[in-house]
Image (cartoon, rainbow, N blue to C red):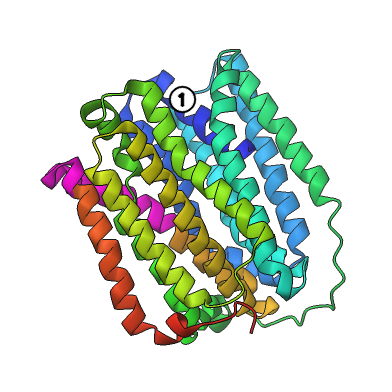
Amino acid sequence: MANQMMMVVVAWQMYDITNSAYDLGLVGLAQFLPSLVLVLIAGQAADRFDRRYILAWCLGGQLLVVAGLVAGTLGGWLTRDAILLASIALGVTKAFQMPTQQALAPQLVPAVALPRALATISSGTQAAIVTGPALGGFLYVAGTHMVYMVCGVLFLAALGALSFIRLEQAPRAREKVGLQSLFAGISFIWQRQEVLGAISLDLFAVLLGGAVALLPIFARDILHVGPWGLGLLRSAPSVGALLMSLYLANNPIQRHAGKVMFGSVALYGVATLAFGLSSSFLLSLIALALTGVFDMVSVVVRQSLVQLDTPDAMRGRVSAVNSIFIGASNQLGEFESGMTAGWFGAVPSVLIGGLGTLLIVALWIRLFPALARRDKLVN
């Protein structure tokens, strides 16, 4: 929740100060690049040290950033460069937090319960995505500093929750740090075809099928609903994902996991096509909600496969690489949508993305037949 609010308020404040769309884009880039640069180090750390302590340092770092933003806002000295530095600092903490958090979950529940646990975690994430920006916007009326202060309280609450985690585990063997160890996560994924197939399928599906970056165009020029409609359109995928994650938490996928994953990605492409062809606001909302539903099925299957097929000693490095795939698909997906929309128009861009997703599914079934035949998530 705090992270979602921070993303909103930092961007708002940057735009208030500079009135520059370019600087607005730099905020997102500043938060993404540290993950790309630190991927090997973050994964190595998550496999060598107690993951709870790494998360504690990450949350503590975010608290310090929040304190600096509050001081700068109240003191009137917060500048464009200061916000960019704060964004880089947040990116550094997230670079370590994301893979560590993913690798920690399998240590807390038995393997047979992991798919349900991941669905439950995803439901919390989606609830934060739906409510966090709205709460941040509401609090922004009371002052930017008020949003940052509430974020600080939420980071403290996360630290409190972290203190309740107890792990019983044998001491880890200290693997010698070297190039082989640093690149072990990439090597592991490359050698495990089912893991590689699951991660790359999600990468290309989101890269091609994402329409979120073009929603302002659809809201204003095609559906004619204005800012209020844009807000509903942006929240629709998260609402669909939240509902599906709650369902999967109570009804985990038992059989035909590979077919379910490929089928859900294909339906994600079909829902994207429906959105691109729609001129009805209600139908567009339903189509976007369905993209969230089918994407969540794919996410839970992919995360379960990655975590269950990876030894605990490797989970940090593999999760770090997986996090880069996820971040790259979102960032590059927005770039791809913008470029194709500039060349062909918004509607053709979405239709090309939907058709591309369906082609990727067909191609990946042939390239990764073992993944398509995967039955149970827990072997």
Residue 359 placement: quadrant? bottom left
- Give the main secondary structure, helix, strand or loop, of the magenta stretch: helix
Residue depicted at x 25% and y 55%? 353
Q: Quadrant of residue 27?
A: top left
Could you tell me residue 58's position as x and y percent? 68, 49
Observer-nearest residue: 358 or 334?
Answer: 358
Q: Is residue 326 left or right of residue 337?
A: right
Image location of residue 5, percent across then percent down:
57, 32
Work out whether residue 67 or residue 263 is closer to the camera in this orientation and state it: 263
Task: Indicate whether residue 329 is drawn in magenta.
Answer: yes
Q: Is residue 19 visible?
A: no
Q: Which residue is mark 1?
A: 12
Question: Is 191 above or below relative to 128?
Answer: below
**Which stretch did the figure color magenta?**
327-348
The quadrant of the image that shows the N terminus is top right
Amino acid type, mark 1: Trp
Q: Is residue 189 above or below residue 17?
A: below
Residue 259 lies, in percent from the top left, at 45, 75
At a point 59% along the width and 33% down the height, the residue shown is: 131
